[in-house]
Structures are given as structure tokens and as C-alpha cells.
């Protein structure tokens, strides 16, 4: 089992709707080729950004699947980009509010932490206002802003070259 498979199963949580399980399966399929075990090496802890990226992608796949009724395998990059950069959104910080609204509309109680979709969303929704500055390196290794935004920015970056 790869590190991605192992950790993503933890990030996914136990149970949940079949659409959630299918979204995570596709997430592992998409990230497997670009996240070999070496991605998880290093002195700083990448789990926050990697967890947010994988969980953000799985949540986006889940939302598109449930909202549009198309199979998870048919969700494309343009579908995901419309969720992360929607037309008509005046500010990027509106995106997490829209995702929360969709989750509620799909029947998720955002206070029910026994729901694996909600449990992961509550982590993705955490807003870290200021990155920690590392004086030794002269830069920050922690993210700033809601995890869903940082994670989706990473997973959709050109650097990732994700084949959706």
C-alpha cells in the first residue's frame, strides 16, 4: 500500500455516502501518478497541504457528482475549476461559503461530525489567518487561509499537471 493510499483512507474517514467513497477512489487514482511516496518525505510536515489538496479534490468531485448527477469518472477539470473560481464570485473567500451551502442543500448537517463528509469539511474550512514565518529559512512552510482554497490551489496548479 502506498503512503497516499494509507493516508487518504484516514483523510476520507469511515463510511459516508457511496458518492463520497467514489470521489475518494477517483482522487487516489488521479493523485497516485503525481504523488509517489517521496512526496511525503522531507523535514517539514506536508500533511496539512497534501491532506487539504486531496480532501479538497475529493469534496469537489463529490459536490459535482451530487449536484449535476454525472458519474465521478466524468467530472473534468473545468467542473472543478468552476467550483473553485465560480463566475460571479466577487471574492475568493466566498468559495468556502458556497461549498458549505451546497453541502447543506445535499442534506449534510454541518454540526454532525459523525458524517465523514462533514468531519473533513470542518478541517478544510479552518482559516489560518497568518502563516508561521521560519526565521532560519526566511519563509513560511504553513498555509494561510481556508484549507479548501489552499488545497485546491495546490492540486490544480500547473506544477501538479493533474490529468482530470
Image: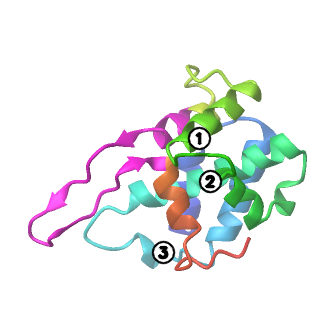
The span from disc 2 to disc 3 (Cα, nearest Å) is 27 Å
Percent position of residue 45, x then y: 31, 61
Q: Which callout, 1 or 2, points to the residue nearer the camera?
A: 2
Tell me the SS state at disc 2: helix
Q: Name the residue under label 1.
A: 13
Residue 68 image point, x, y percent: 87, 45
The quarter of the rendered structure image containing the N terminus is: bottom right
Q: Which of marks 1 and 2 is nearer the N terminus?
A: 1
Magenta highlight on residue 130 = yes
Q: Which residue is drawn at 81% across and 60% down?
A: 75
* Span colored in magenta: 119-147
Quadrant position of residue 106: top right
Q: Exactly how many numbered labels are in the figure? A: 3
Q: Please determine whether, in this image, residue 109 is positioned above or below residue 84.
A: above
Residue name at image x 58 percent, y 21 percent: 112
Residue holding disc 3: 37
Q: Does the magenta stretch include residue 22?
A: no
Residue 36, position in %: x, y? 53, 77
Q: Which mark is residue 84?
A: 2
Residue neighbourhood size for the residue with mark 2, other residues' Cα within 10 Å, grouped as few (<14), some (14–19), many (≥20): many
Q: Where is residue 66 in the image (x, y as percent from the top left)?
A: 82, 41
Amino acid at each position: 500500500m502506498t503512503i497516499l493510499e494509507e493516508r487518504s483512507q484516514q483523510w476520507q474517514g469511515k463510511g459516508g455516502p457511496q458518492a463520497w467513497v467514489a470521489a475518494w477512489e477517483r482522487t487516489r487514482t488521479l493523485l497516485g501518478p503525481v504523488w509517489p511516496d517521496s512526496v511525503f518525505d522531507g523535514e517539514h510536515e506536508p500533511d496539512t497541504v497534501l491532506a487539504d489538496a486531496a480532501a479538497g479534490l475529493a469534496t469537489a468531485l463529490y459536490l459535482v457528482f451530487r449536484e449535476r448527477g454525472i458519474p465521478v469518472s466524468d467530472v473534468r477539470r473545468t467542473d472543478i475549476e468552476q467550483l473553485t473560481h465560480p463566475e460571479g464570485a466577487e471574492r475568493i473567500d466566498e468559495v468556502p461559503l458556497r461549498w458549505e451551502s451546497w453541502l447543506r442543500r445535499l442534506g449534510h448537517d454541518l454540526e454532525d461530525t459523525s458524517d465523514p463528509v462533514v468531519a473533513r469539511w470542518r478541517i478544510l474550512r479552518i482559516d489560518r489567518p497568518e502563516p508561521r514565518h521560519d526565521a532560519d529559512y526566511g519563509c513560511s512552510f504553513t498555509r494561510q487561509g481556508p484549507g479548501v482554497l489552499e488545497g485546491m490551489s495546490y492540486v490544480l496548479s500547473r506544477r501538479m499537471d493533474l490529468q482530470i
